Image: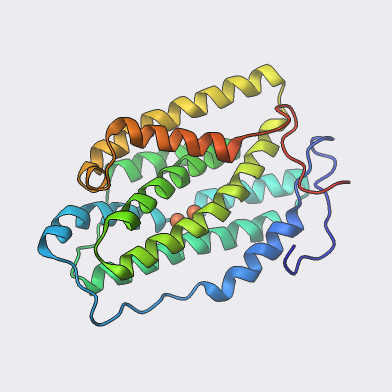
Amino acid sequence: MRGASRPTLAAGWTGCVVFDWNYWLAEFEARVPRLVVAPIPAGSRLSGEEKARIGDSIGTFQLGEQSEGRTLLRFAEDFALRRNIPQLPRVTELFIREEQHHAAQLRAFMLAHGLPLKQRNWTNSIFRQIRRLAGYEAAVTILVTAEMIGFVYYRALARNTGNACLRTICRQMCADEAIHLRYEAQLLRTLRGARAPWLRLLVERAHRVFLGITARIVFREHRAVLEHAGHDAHSFRRDCASLHRTVLACPNPRYGVRTHAP
Ligand SMILES: [Fe+2]
Ligand SMILES: [Fe+2]
């Protein structure tokens, strides 16, 4: 546990589920110095064909990473107050900062290659509207869904762009998203763990359906990039579903994973 202080338990709010908030606080704090936009090498080039294929698609993902996260932070602050988790607002703030770093890095790449930035995208707008209307658990569920889709997308893009700088950016973002997914998955398991097992199974089923629908929409919107990376609609959905199984796999379906023994 890198630089973490003595672990404490979020005791008293489920009675069973353990979430080590100090671990995640230390983890995100330790990552802050890395949040510096890497300069784009002067010789970095994209062919006209590649610009046409990936420009609009990267613009949409750049916009998605750019959120100020006000809704998420508000939910987290309310939840932290109700459940007495003083670390949660800061963890959420640092997490949002990492997503903004992704946006800034993609922005630098786009500007260096003359790719136009996007101001709006209908899928982003819908995601944000739903998040605003939802509660904390639903907002985290939507976030996890977006992170899973983003992970599969960036991994595909890294494998299939001829630009070395973009490959590095995508791989770094995949590495970051893997940590985000670990955090969010533990958080989600903890939130869901307070439910009756049958209700929890129902919620998890609904999440898988939501992920499947979202993956279908994303594939249609980013078909040129994903097909060039060797995906079809089925393989893209399958990879997203497999990531969902991996990330949210839970040895104890009732309580989630213990991150620390009491
Ligand atoms: Fe991200
Ligand atoms: Fe992320």
Farthest right residue in view = 262
Lateral position of residue 78 relative to residue 238, left or right: right
Q: Nearer the viewer, residue 212 or 81?
A: 212
Q: Which residue appears at 65% of the width and 56% of the height?
A: 89
Q: Residue 236 location in percent, x, y? A: 35, 37
Residue 119 visible in the current orientation: no
Q: Which image quarter holds the N terminus? A: bottom right
Q: Residue 194 location in percent, x, y? A: 73, 30
Lateral position of residue 109 relative to residue 82, left or right: left
Q: Nearer the viewer, residue 175 or 254?
A: 175
Q: Which residue appears at 41% of the width and 43% of the height?
A: 149
Q: Quadrant of residue 161?
A: bottom left
Image position of 3 with respect to 250: above or below: below
Q: Which residue appears at 73% of the width and 58% of the height?
A: 23
Lateral position of residue 182 relative to residue 229, left or right: right
Q: Residue 262 location in percent, x, y? A: 89, 46
Q: Quadrant of residue 66?
A: bottom left
Q: Residue 138 location in percent, x, y? A: 54, 35
Q: Which residue appears at 65% of the width and 70% of the height?
A: 30
